[in-house]
Amino acid sequence: MRKHVLYVISILMIASMILAACAPAPAETAAPTEAAAPTDAPKATEAPKATEAPVATEAPVATEEPMAECTDAIGCVTLAAGDPVHIAYLMVVSGANETLGIDSRNGVEIAIEDAGGEILGHPIKFDGEDGGCGAEGGQSAGTKLAADPTIIGVVGTSCSSEARVAVPLLSQAGFVIVSASNTAPDLTEAGNVNNHPGYLRTAHNDVVQGAVAAEYAYNELGVTRAATIHDGSLYADKLQQVFAENFVALGGTITAQEAVDPAQTDMSAVLASIAAVPPELIYLPIFMPAGALIIRQTKQTPGLEETALMGADGLFSPDLVEGAGDDVEGFKVSSPLTTGEAYDAFVAKYNAKFGTEAPISIFHAHAYDAFNIIKAAIEATAVEGADGSLVIGRQALRDALYATANFPGLTGNLTCTPTGDCADPNIAVYEYHAGEYPPTVIWPTE
Amino acid sequence: MRRNWRQRITITDLVVWGIGIAIGAVVVIGTIATLRSGKYAPSTWLDLAIKGLALGGVYALIAMGYTLVYGVLRMINFAHSEVFMSGPFTAVFFANYLARTGFLDQQPALSMLMILLLSMAVSMSIALLLERVAYRPLRTAPRLVPLITAIGASFFLQYTFRGLYGSGFQAYPIPEVLKGSIQIGAIRVFYTQIAAILGAVAMMIILYSIVQRTKMGKAMRTISEDKEVAAMMGIDVDRTIAFTFALGGLSAGAAGILYSLLFPVVNFYMGFIPGLKAFTAAVLGGIGNVAGAFLGAIIIGLLESVGPNLFLDGLGIPTPSQLKDGIAFTILVFILIFRPTGLLGERVAQAKA
């Protein structure tokens, strides 16, 4: 018995030694200095451009050589000649919503390729963490990234629920964070506890998307009675609220505002409750798989067989066509529409690089732009030393990002507001047909 | 005598009873309020009840796996939800192939049977493999060890299947003959629901007769009484335990196909919630008891389907259906507090004694 215990302990010892040897060195050295940061981060309620957040974010390399001096309020990143510029991602790259994050990551990879793989003569290092499209994943991924002082900027997060917990950690660490697909309004609302300095986004704000959806439903479809379903996520809840407010303002009636659990499979209770006062349209800005299950079960609920269904960009996914089968026919989603020659060239590159027929989700162009505004801001603020070194002031970088104006991106001309909304939103309504992806644009008509 | 009774009551008992009475009051008041508001037509309740019955039948088949294994090994096989997932998640590719070639609609009975058999075969193999690799070497270990192994095996299987088939969602094709519904009076019943209920009842009868009437079933029941004595009587314990797992796997595989008829979207994570519900059902009925598992599953299925609208809607609770899972787990907690042996548990214990 004792022999066995010894045996197991020694195996564990060897395994831990191997693990320790393989761990990336910067993470280890960073751990002690950064340990305190995550705990006070969630309380951070500063104004968006506050110049505090005094977290130790010193250079990863010793600074013996004569280099430009750092006078930045929240620290600098100093790169010796040849050191990589480290940009990380925090996206959902596994699980049910992985296409959303992988698609955005693909967009960034193409942007890096287009940049020739370097910024100001320094190679770009691009890696990151999976946020799992939820608060838990966002917390652990955010903690990991915040502990790495070599990171300059983060492209992410994929989902607003991740952003709520990860952004305070990353903001506290002094990074700039640019999301390609967070659309929840509170993230860039001045004075909101979820709005943090250094956070910007190239995705549209749902204040815009919800309004477009309501306008389409009332004016174009001509429905006057609608019900909404959300799944308790930050994104879905806010979006259905914005939709309901706009729909009522236009003169419509909201018959029910229901919610389901994201992992729920039997939707009969919620659908029966909606069918008690039958609406003409059900707006369900949720995710997979609940979206597909609701679409299928609505067709089987007495009184709702002919009700129109509409979702939002969370259900713009090949998985929906797969999951909802024939019942997807006629399902509508609101989603950004990106057009233009530059975009077509981008899509061609994307398909060639990743072997796809069409991009697998919708925020690839936003991610491409997100990376490029970070890159432009680095180029505008970094101080180059004579020896090829580079000093990037973290606050200066943030200021430069917020000052982005008329930046020609794939998704339009980007101008950032003081709270971090950079998008030039162009929302369209798409319609699904059974077995076909992507869905076709049906509105605006020209 | 009376003083004795008083002494035995503690503060904890009072609090627990208080909570129990409060929940009972919520249920009664909510039900009355909902029914008086007249928001739902009577046919809606019947529709929901039929759905609940169909769902309960599926839970019953999954619960069989928990309850049979508990009966012989006195352990909870938490990886059973993955045994349940493996069958339909594998068979969906075969089913889609049949749908593409048109065979599914030409020979619906034959192809459904083939899909069912494939799913049952896969689930059975996974269950046998699980028993051989993860549980048999630990049979003499303390009880906590196989429990933790089961959780580990559950994750292992989930992510193995994710690696094999991807993390996306697959839609189950439904043959033309099963689409549509019939109207019986005010109730509308879907053919898929009829198929699920009939399938579940047939499977239950088969399982029940195997356990009660065959020699192997007798061996299983003997082992559940006393493993050592059974071995001394010349019963091959290893083989009988493997047979129990196989039986649980078969019923889980069948349950998977019936579940996919009701909710035709499968992915690697589909087993988790139904597994928990079925486990609740097994505990509710009295774990280790075949008839109890069936009863418990039907109750859970019905309450879950009718409950949110009936109990909670009338109280003005917004979005009651989000609390659907809460109903099942509240039942679990209260069963564990007030009647740990389950609904039919005690009768069996007495019969054994």
Image (cartoon, coloured by chain):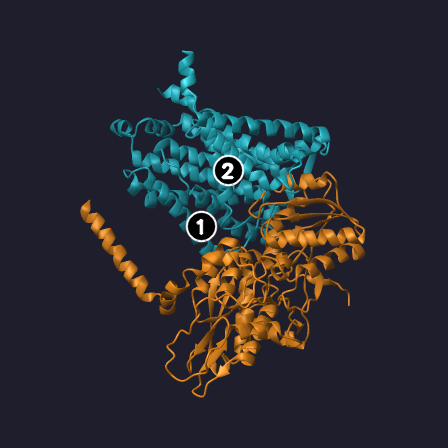
Badge 1: few (under 14), some or many (20 or more) residues near its Cα, within 10 Å?
many
Image colour assigned to chain B: cyan
Q: Chain of mark 2?
A: B
Identify the element where label 2 is drawn: helix
Q: Nearer the viewer, residue B317 or A98?
A: B317
Residue A148, located in which quarter of the rendered image? bottom left
According to the image, label 1 marks what residue? Answer: B158
Which residue does the image show at 38% across and 31% down from the upper left? B71
A267 in relation to A397, above or below? above
According to the image, label 2 marks what residue? Answer: B277
Image colour assigned to chain A: orange
Q: From the image, which quarter does the C terminus of chain B lie in?
A: top left
Closer to the camera: disc 2 or disc 1? Answer: 2
Residue B200, given in percent of the width and then of the height, sits at: 53, 34
| Mark 2 or mark 1, earlier in chain | 1
User: Could you tell whether A103 is left or right of A219 in the image?
Assistant: left
The answer to whether the residues at label 2 and label 1 have Cβ atoms under 8 Å apart is: no
User: Could you tell whether B122 is left or right of B318 in the image?
Assistant: left
Residue A349, given in percent of the width and then of the height, sits at: 57, 75
Identify the element where label 1 is drawn: helix
Q: Nearer the viewer, residue B66 or A201?
A: A201
Residue B217, given in percent of the width and then of the height, sits at: 38, 29
